Amino acid sequence: MPLKNRIPVAVLVIVMSGTMLNCQGQTGSPKLQQGEKESPAPVMSPSAGGAPFTQFQHVFADVADKVMPAVVSVKSERKVEVTRQGMPFDFFNEDPFGFFFGQPRQPRENQNRPPQERQESGLGSGVIVTEDGYILTNNHVIQGADKLIVQLSDESEYEAKVIGSDPASDLAVIKITDEKKKFAKVPFGDSDKIRIGEWVVAVGSPFGLYKTVTTGIVSAKGRKNTGISTYGNFIQTDAAINPGNSGGPLVNLHGELVGINTAIYSRTGGYQGIGFAIPVALAQTVMQDLIKDGEVTRGWLGVSIQPVTEDMASALGLKSRKGALIGDVLPDGPAAKAGMKRGDVITKIANNEIDDVNDLLNRVAALRPGTTVEVTVHRDGKSRGLKTKIEKREAEKSATSRGADPEPTGLSSLGMEATELTEASARRYGVETELKAGLLVTQVTPGGPAVEAGLRSGDIVVEANRKPVKSAAELKKALEGVKKGEKALILINRSGNTFYGVLTMP
């Protein structure tokens, strides 16, 4: 089930706590029997007025007071081209209530006029992390915007400048400036040290309801294969997150930033208890690169890797499925220079144990180019350490080295990147398939047309508009006659199962 964050759904749940009733339906303590002693009032009872309860009930309010001044609403504005078909007003394709919101129905003689531009706006959240106005938010909040308006908790507004964005992690940095003041900020916490079950607080603008505070716990850590972005082991939380919370902060009870709220898992588009936040450890690294260089620099090892299955672990003499199996070593890459071979299993890097393919991908990406680390591999029943100098990840370099696995190109308008399906590309992205041809999806953008169509990373697009596709160029050609806002049928293969999706053209 793809991650979605649209379709507003409002459910009001009221939880009431009252005085317990005794067996006779009366309030208060039951009558004591002879020889019994009265029990002390529960320390957490509101009616007891005890210090522990009083302190606890103010914890979240104190966190909200501390964080709220640095949480912002981010309004994105962009111009889009719209056309009118030569048809009367259509209740199925046009907003029947548009007249009440300043969108009067057009006279029939104007319905065949040339395309016009219309202003569209979106709303997300962000968090100020420096006194001079640097703001962390999501890439999908600011993507494609012509103008960004940031509103602070005191309702003052600033036009923001985009410092840089990183679709691979779905993070962006924007900045507001005011020479007369220092902005409130949220201090960075340590996302590596948060524990499952720990209380957290989310703040943002769900459905445009600015300054909304919700609480919950850390439900899980290190969530991978979510289809949200290429990099990031996500924090899962049950703090209520809804459309509009994107880019807002997830903080601990010290009021420290531990995550950037990014997406929800939902069958309805609304909150269902599963939300995902980008760990602040990753956000800080991305932010530093974007501010310094305008782009993110990631480490590159030069290998194609795949998961270690139960059968593979048995055949290779491994005690567990931990690690990443090398399916191919790219010529002249760091791994090749270090002596790594096809069939090696990477179990450690820089003394950090590798859990799986995604763990290795994230750890290598976090390393600075030029860094020399020891990579531990399992080969022929033995472990050996290989000194490896990490190089800079460059899409054009890896594409050239792969030869048969070309560089992903030109599908960003559809909210995706993809590459031709080959044995090499399937190995590189850990896709097991018997298909010989198709378009392998390597990345999707949250909230984009591809996600809305049901696509996620690792899927294979087999057909578009009933036409076979094997490359990005063939996909574009198959969609040439589909106009903006119209829908195209796509055939998707996922783990051997084939199904159709509907792609709405941007």
Image (cartoon, rainbow, N blue to C red):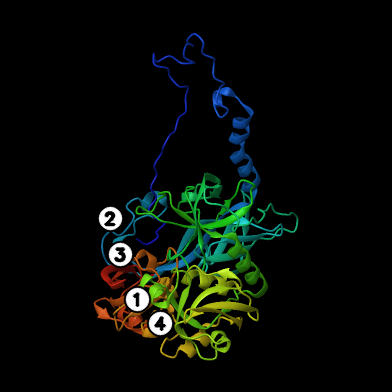
User: Are circles 4 and 1 on residues that touch, CB within 8 Å?
Assistant: no
**Foreground disc of the pair 4, 2:** 4
User: Are circles 4 and 3 on residues that touch, CB within 8 Å?
Assistant: no
Nearer the observer, 349 or 109: 349
Q: Amino acid at mark 1?
A: Glu
Mark 2–mark 3 distance (CA, rounded to whole Å): 18 Å
User: Are circles 1 and 3 on residues that touch, CB within 8 Å?
Assistant: no
**Foreground disc of the pair 4, 3:** 4
Residue placed under numbered mark 3 in the picture: 109
Residue 264 x, y percent position in the rendering: 44, 56
Residue placed under numbered mark 4 in the picture: 425
Residue placed under numbered mark 1 in the picture: 432
Residue 278 x, y percent position in the rendering: 53, 60
Mark 4–mark 3 distance (CA, rounded to whole Å): 53 Å
* Mark 2 nearby-residue class (10 Å; few <14, some 14–19, many ≥20): few
Q: Amino acid at mark 3?
A: Glu
Which of marks 3 and 1 precedes in the sequence? 3
